[in-house]
Amino acid sequence: MSLTQLWRVDADPANAQNGEQYAEAAQLLQGGGTVAFPTETVYGLGADACNTTAVERIFAAKGRPSDNPLIVHIADMKQLDDLILPTGQLARMLMNRFWPGPLTIVLPVKPGAVSPKVTAGLDTVAVRMPAHPVARQLIAASGRPIAAPSANRSGRPSPTTAAHVIDDLDGRIDAVLDGGTAGVGLESTVIELVDEETVRILRPGGVTAEQLLQLAAKVEYDSSSAPDASGHNDGGGAAEPGLEAPRSPGMKYTHYAPRGDMQLVQGEAAEVAACIQSAARQARSRGERTGVLVFAEHAALYGEEEHVIVLGRLSALDEAAQGLYAALRAFDDRQVQRIWAETCPEAGIGHALMNRLSKAAGHRITRV
Ligand code: TXA
Ligand code: MG
């Protein structure tokens, strides 16, 4: 493959001018091609979930390990019935409440419903109905269930703009639909249902534990989804030996990593700043390029530092979540070799944000 087509589309479905682009993109998908598109979480790299050759193209383009299964994206409930075995009441309630939206539910797969490459041989399939109008229109136009991981090279931060996708995958995929910046900025929450009362979070994300508790009597975290767990995600890095097998295969891989060496520092803001600045000074004296990732409330503490990226406000963590992956990519663009980052409280979207920050830092957290 050599040429990746880039189409700009209006995120407003009322704008019918883009009909041609959707039709072309849908034709590519129907013919076994790969098309990247925006969702309300991050950009996904889509292919027909029923077509093994097409799905293999996703793995090849990303450099993704084949034991890491893909999420299947649907546009309506009719598509769901073709994919999964009959489910209980809790699953239906969760779908009614959170779909379309950033929630992925792992459910028993109907044998033969999708390519075995999608499920990596498991007897379950992860399904999500995205809310982004471009994603919905593309999936509907293709008439297929669409397997789509995040549209990054394995091990790189997930893309939140079409430019990020092009940076990672130009020439390796057929097309990109550019529908502007993705919304949440972090991937969907992946859950499985333990029983009719209990939801287990395999990967924290856009739908929070607090929200899930409105419908489930109990919400628990898989050990690999905790911010300081040594489990990793998505592929690209090495699997860690000797750890309990994670329930979500992707959680065992390193992920979200900037190219520079990153660490988190946790504690009272002024002490954190003192610790980071002392470490950064030493690194610069060794000739290393340094950067810090901080919250707006504390930015003034880092006046002397180079490559300060402000993630957003601690008081508006959803904005910080939106900017995380672009910030990690910006450190790469500036060729920063050593990065220190502040931490945030693990409530609401803060849980997912800390999970991704912690992964980006290879789980290295210094407490001061
Ligand atoms: O927001 C998102 O979820 C984005 C957009 C594009 O929808 N997609 C995404 O896909 O993040 P990906 O492939 O980067 O992450 C999928 C995660 C992986 O950790 C994978 O192991 C897990 O979902 N997963 C997929 N199928 C599974 C299954 N049957 N059982 C358990 N985990 C599964
Ligand atoms: Mg991913």
Image: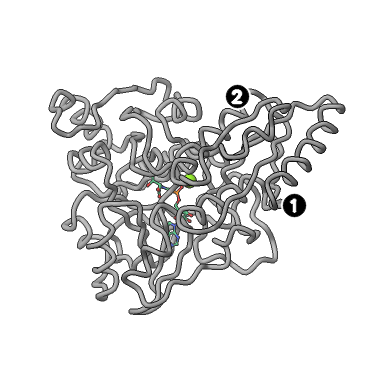
235 to 138, vertically: above or below? below
Residue drawn at the location 51% of the way across and 66% of the way down: 247
What SS does tag 1 mark?
A: strand
In the displayed structure, does residue 309 sit left or right of residue 84?
right
Residue located beneath label 1 in the image: 366
Color scheme of the displayed model: one colour
Q: Quadrant of residue 197?
A: bottom left
Residue 121 horizontal/vertical position (percent): 43, 61
Instruction: Please name the residue that numbered disc 2 is placed on.
Output: 333
* Mark 1–mark 2 distance (CA, rounded to whole Å): 26 Å
Residue at image position (49%, 38%) is: 62
Image vertical order of residue 277 relative to residue 170, above or below: below
Q: Amino acid at mark 1?
A: Thr
Label 2 secondary element: helix
Q: Amino acid at mark 2?
A: Asp
Q: Reading the chain from its start, which is encountered first: label 1 or label 2?
A: 2
Q: From the top left corner, tell me how far across and down residue 90 is, in percent.
A: 29, 73
Residue 169 or residue 132, whichever sits in front = 132
Q: Is residue 67 visible in this depiction of the protein?
A: no
Q: Quadrant where the N terminus lies?
A: top left
Determine which quarter of the picture holds residue 340.
top right
